[in-house]
């Protein structure tokens, strides 16, 4: 018996014959992955596993936890943690069976069959001379959120620590588990041909690999024929046996998982950023008959046009240079210290975005206006974004005159296929993404983007760089709360 965090844990393992030496293997509750993972593929796969397992568990009458192992080897096994029954499926097996939903059902039913037939306890009596123990760091009902890439980000059951020695079921026990699984599959509406395909794949592995499942699940022609004969004897309905091979995860399941993740992210971001108050009527009062929103949108048009197209844009909007300058001075002064107005400016400015990154500007506008996460994939990698930011900052981008801007565009941005306007949108998009990550608990993106060192607590060490102060968009000072600031 091993004590961890005050919990006494004993593990009696069946279906794992050889010792497990990989200390990096992790175990996760599948239902937690289905609700916690930030990876859509993984979340969808966990959802579908849950559905199949619930069907098979209901038919079996067995109450057992379903656990996901990151072990890349092809295997699945039934086990007990104290008095808790557990079925473990390994990533290697799921990868092999991902294209065959019925074969996955056959695997899950087979492992539940070992529990139903009490093979684990029978095996323990048979092997009473050997210790069948392992160390599981954490209880099966425990939970730990993942971080970083979020590939798993589920509820961690724990790590395998130490050597696990387990029982090997004999062929009769394996065939009994097969029989139970086939009956449950038919009752639950799964095509029992999935069991035959499973056996065929295991037989192929027997010839070409040393997968762990072969030492714990012996294959034979006799076992395949027994399954085939049982299916014929049970005579399942034609609509079941005629079902085509279906993938574990379909397009609908993946889309649903993606929508769930988006919804959770939006909730987290909205909670972290807080609700935004609208600017006052006084702050929005027109200047030179130019409304605040019209001014912000016009400012974007002028930035896109550059110095050469400025006169044409102003004329097209029936605004003189003098009128615009007066509006710029007054609205700029109002924005200073008015977070609500600064936010409104950012929304309208980026909503008017043009050019190759216009959709990123629109994504920014939605994020600022609705206090939600950004929904597009990055316009270019973080490494590229950080390198461009460093070069532009070194050149003093915040105080560029027209000549300096043209020089930076020619020497730094054009080799990367960007105009200065494109860079400003992408830069603000990346800063918004980094700031959101920081306020929701992950400062790593912000540190990487700004080229800051990190201390031992994985928090950015800012040195002489002060984040969020005196930043600008389109020449206008903007507060941190407005989001998507230009930090050049």
Image (cartoon, helix red, strand yellow):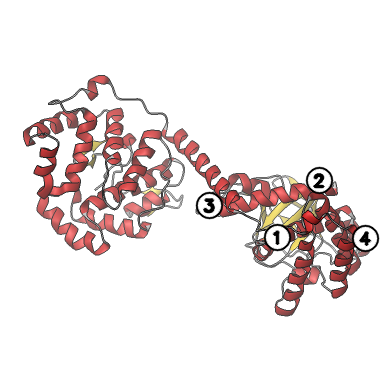
Residue matched to label 2: 58
Above/below status of 363 relative to 327 = below
Residue matched to label 4: 125
CB atoms of marks 1 and 2 within 8 Å: no
Q: Residues within 10 Å of mark 2 (few under 14, many from 20)?
A: few
The x and y percentages for residue 297 are 23, 37
Q: Residues within 10 Å of mark 1 (few under 14, many from 20)?
A: few
Above/below status of 419 relative to 31 = below
Residue drawn at the location 80% of the way across and 56% of the way down: 238
Q: Residues within 10 Å of mark 4 (few under 14, many from 20)?
A: few
Say left or right for 85 vs 406: right
Q: Nearer the viewer, residue 487 or 214?
A: 214
Q: Earlier in the sequence, mark 2 or mark 3?
A: 2
CB atoms of marks 1 and 3 within 8 Å: no
Q: Earlier in the sequence, mark 1 or mark 3?
A: 3
| Residue ranking furthest to the front | 238
The x and y percentages for residue 230 are 89, 62
């Amino acid at each position: 018996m091993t004590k961890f965090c005050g919990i006494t844990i004993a593990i009696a393992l069946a279906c794992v014959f050889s010792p497990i030496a990989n200390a990096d293997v992790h175990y996760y509750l599948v239902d937690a992955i289905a609700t916690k993972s930030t990876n859509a593929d993984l979340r969808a796969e966990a959802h579908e596993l849950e559905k199949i397992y619930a069907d098979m568990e209901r038919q079996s009458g067995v109450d057992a936890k379903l656990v996901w192992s990151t072990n890349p080897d092809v295997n699945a096994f039934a086990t007990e943690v104290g008095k808790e029954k557990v079925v473990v499926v390994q990533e290697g097996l799921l990868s092999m069976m991902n294209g065959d939903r019925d074969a996955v059902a056959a695997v899950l039913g087979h492992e539940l069959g070992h529990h139903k037939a009490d093979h684990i306890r029978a095996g323990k009596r048979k092997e009473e001379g050997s210790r069948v123990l392992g160390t599981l760091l954490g209880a099966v009902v425990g939970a730990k959120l993942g971080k970083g890439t979020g590939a798993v980000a589920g509820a961690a059951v724990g790590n395998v620590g130490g050597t696990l020695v387990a029982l090997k079921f004999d062929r009769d026990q394996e065939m009994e588990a097969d029989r139970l699984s086939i009956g449950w599959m038919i009752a639950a509406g799964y095509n029992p041909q999935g069991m035959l395909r499973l056996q065929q794949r295991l037989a192929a592995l027997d010839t070409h690999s040393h997968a762990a499942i072969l030492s714990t699940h012996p294959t034979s022609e006799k076992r395949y024929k027994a399954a085939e004969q049982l299916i014929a004897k049970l005579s399942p309905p034609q609509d079941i046996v005629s079902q085509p091979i279906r993938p574990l995860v379909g397009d609908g399941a993946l889309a649903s998982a993606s929508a769930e993740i988006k919804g959770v992210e939006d909730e987290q971001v909205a909670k972290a950023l807080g609700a935004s108050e609208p600017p006052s009527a006084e702050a929005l009062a027109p200047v030179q008959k130019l409304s605040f929103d019209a001014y912000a949108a016009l400012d974007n048009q002028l930035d896109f046009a550059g110095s050469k197209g400025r006169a044409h844009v102003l004329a097209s909007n029936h605004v003189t240079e003098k009128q615009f300058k007066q509006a710029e001075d007054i609205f700029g002064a109002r924005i200073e210290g008015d977070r609500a107005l600064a936010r409104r400016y950012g929304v309208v400015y980026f909503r008017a975005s043009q050019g190759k990154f216009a959709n990123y500007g629109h994504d920014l506008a939605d994020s600022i206006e609705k206090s939600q996460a950004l929904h597009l994939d990055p316009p270019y990698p973080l490494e590229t974004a950080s390198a461009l930011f460093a070069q532009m900052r070194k050149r003093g981008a915040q105080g560029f005159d027209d000549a300096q801007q043209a020089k930076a565009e020619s020497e730094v941005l054009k080799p990367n296929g960007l105009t200065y306007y494109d860079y400003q949108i992408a830069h603000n998009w990346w800063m918004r993404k980094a700031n959101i990550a920081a306020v929701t608990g992950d400062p790593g993106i912000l540190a990487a983007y700004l080229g800051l060192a990190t201390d031992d607590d994985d928090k950015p060490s800012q040195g002489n760089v002060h984040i969020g102060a005196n930043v600008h968009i389109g020449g206008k000072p903007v507060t941190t709360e407005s989001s998507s600031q230009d930090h050049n």
